[in-house]
Image (cartoon, rainbow, N blue to C red):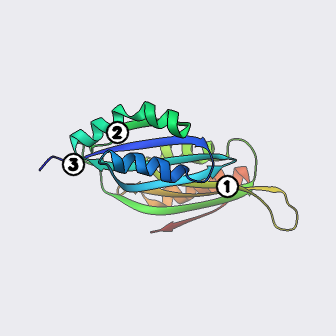
Amino acid sequence: MDLLHHAVLTAVGDDRPGLVDEVTRYVTERGGNLEDSRMVNLRGQFAMMMLIAGDEAAMARLQDGLGQLRRASHVHAELRPADAGSAEQAPALPFRLTTWAMDHPGLMQSIAHLLTEKGVNIESVESSLRPAPYTNTPLFEMELVVSLPATTPVADVREALGDLCDELNIDWQLTAL
């Protein structure tokens, strides 16, 4: 039996019916198996990230056919190897960080920078801009799943988040998963 390999396929193109069908068919026809994905329509641009598994021959067929996928589906597509490295990860605790504030530039970067300083890894982020109730003021919301190193005191992260969020007028909540 061939060793199973993994790769991340990203594809972005104009949103339209059938796009997911075309890209996932491309994967299946070349012997790949979709294991995990995130897909979203962002103002008419449909973005897909997919973790694909397959043997070495399937990965070669996927890589070799990217030009055909790009032309046929009118997407920008890229395939990157995603086989796990040999480095061991330090024990970490999962948390969900939810924030919301009146929109202004730099909100996500400010939070990301603080988390980086504390050694916290961001595992996933979802954000959106919505009108606030009653006032319709643009409200920027973020939900992050993060991993705190087991050696990092949660109280230190909470204190730093509190200080930053008070400074930037961000409401926030950090909960263990």
Residue 45 appears anywhere in the view: yes
Looking at the image, tell me whether mark 2 or mark 3 is earlier in sequence order: 3
Graded by Cα atoms within 10 Å as few (under 14), some (14 to 19) or many (20 or more), the crowding at tag 2 reads many
Assess whether mark 3 and mark 2 are in contact (beta carbons under 8 angstroms). no
Vertical placement of residue 137 versus 67, above or below: below
Q: Residue drawn 64% across and 59% down?
A: 99
Q: Please name whichever residue, 14 or 116, is drawn nearer the observer in this view of the structure.
A: 14
Which residue is rendered at x = 26% and y = 48% of the image?
54
User: Residue at 21% of width from left, 48% of height from top?
Assistant: 4
Task: For marks 3 and 1, give the CA distance.
Answer: 36 Å
Q: What amino acid type is highlighted by mark number 2?
A: Leu
Q: Relative to 76, is 102 above or below?
A: below
Of the two numbered discs 2 and 3 in the rendering, the one whose residue sits closer to the viewer = 2
Residue 75 placement (x, y as % from top left): 54, 38
Q: Which residue is mark 3?
A: 4
Q: Which residue is mark 2?
A: 62
Rendered residue at 40%/56% (across/down): 36
The foreground one among 66 and 38 is: 66
Disc 2 secondary structure class: helix
The residue identified by callout 1 is: 128
Q: For numbered disc 1, what is the local secondary structure? A: strand
